[in-house]
Amino acid sequence: MTDAPSYAQLSQGRIEYRWFGHRDRTPTLVLLHEGLGCVDLWRAFPDELAARTGCGVLAYSRYGYGRSAPCALPRPISYMHDDARTVLPELLRHLDIGDHVLIGHSDGGSIALINAGASAAPGLRGVVTMAAHIFIEDVSVRSIAAASEAFATGRLRQALERYHGTNVDCAFRGWADSWLNPEFLHWNLEEFLPTIRVPCLVMQGETDAYGTAAQVEGIVAGVGSGAGIGGRAEALMLTDCGHAPHQDQPQATLNAIGAFVAGISDESDPE
């Protein structure tokens, strides 16, 4: 069961969101899209995830994406920090979300880690990242520069316009211009990892064109490393998989997330 798009009126404007599966079945799985994503670009994955886990799944489009309110350009270098510490908590409060697991792809994974380490709501039970970044690598910059050239020729613009409409420049330029800004070379999220208290599943494709296994290794080493924190992380590198595990290896991704969510539920249920 998939709901029609709905809108939450937050402090900075409207946010598009959609429920998949049964919204009253917890923990709610909150999907955080990539730097060019939105609700519609998750395609079949939210329905499949709801069916695999039995949980309600919530997807939303951040400001400047999909049918949400536009954002101002250029985006600040701190745009992921801002989403993690301000917009996401506000949306969870607005929708009265209790127990939940954050599932983030690329930028969305980075946002999930910042939120878990700095602004976690009381109901946060776990984090799943797919191709998240915690620092800048040359391969990331090269791939984004190539995407910027494709956008300038019009082909990528036309493809993205189908999903973002009048937000297409907010979506692409807000993402690419931030990553290609020389100041972004100093961007780093490792400070948020030691204070993450919940279990994490860290996934990445072995042929990811936007990041190397060093990202996964850094996340796993850093999560919960603060004294007395107790968070932990497990890594899953997927073969024959690029930047989007949920598209390149959907069954392996669904199985891994399903087992992770079931493990969280087992931990919370007393014998």
Image (cartoon, rainbow, N blue to C red):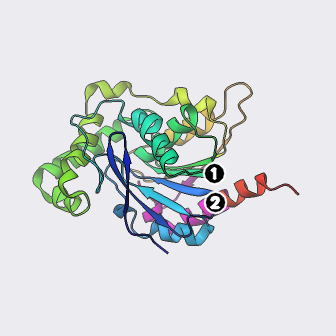
| Residue 256 is inside the magenta segment | yes
Residue 21, given in percent of the width and then of the height, sits at: 53, 70
The residue nearer to you, when weighing 217 against 91, is 91
Which residues fall within the magenta stretch?
236-260
Q: Amino acid at mark 1?
A: Asp
Q: Residue at x 62, y 35 (%)?
A: 196
Residue 141 place in picture, x, y as percent: 30, 38
Q: Quadrant of residue 157?
A: bottom left
Residue 16 included in the magenta stretch of the image = no
- Disc 2: CA contacts within 10 A as few (<14), some (14-19) or many (>=20): some
Going by the image, does 143 lie left or right of 4?
A: left
Disc on res. 141: none
Give me the residue at 54% from left, 34% from top: 119
Q: CA distance from mark 2 to mark 1?
A: 6 Å
User: Can you see residue 234?
Assistant: no
Q: Helix, strand or loop at disc 2?
A: loop
Mark seen at residue 99: 1
Mark 1 is surrounded, within 10 Å at the Cα level, by few (under 14), some (14 to 19) or many (20 or more) other residues, namely: some
Residue 26, numbered label: 2
Pinpoint residue 65: horizontal percent, then vertical percent. 29, 51
Q: How many marks?
A: 2
Q: In what element is the residue under mark 1? A: loop
Q: Residue furthest right?
A: 271
Foreground of the two, 14 or 175: 14
* Residue depicted at x 41% and y 39%: 83
| Above-or-below relation of 112 to 53 | above
Q: x%, y% of residue 183?
A: 30, 24
Residue at the image point whose x is 44% and y is 35% from the top: 86
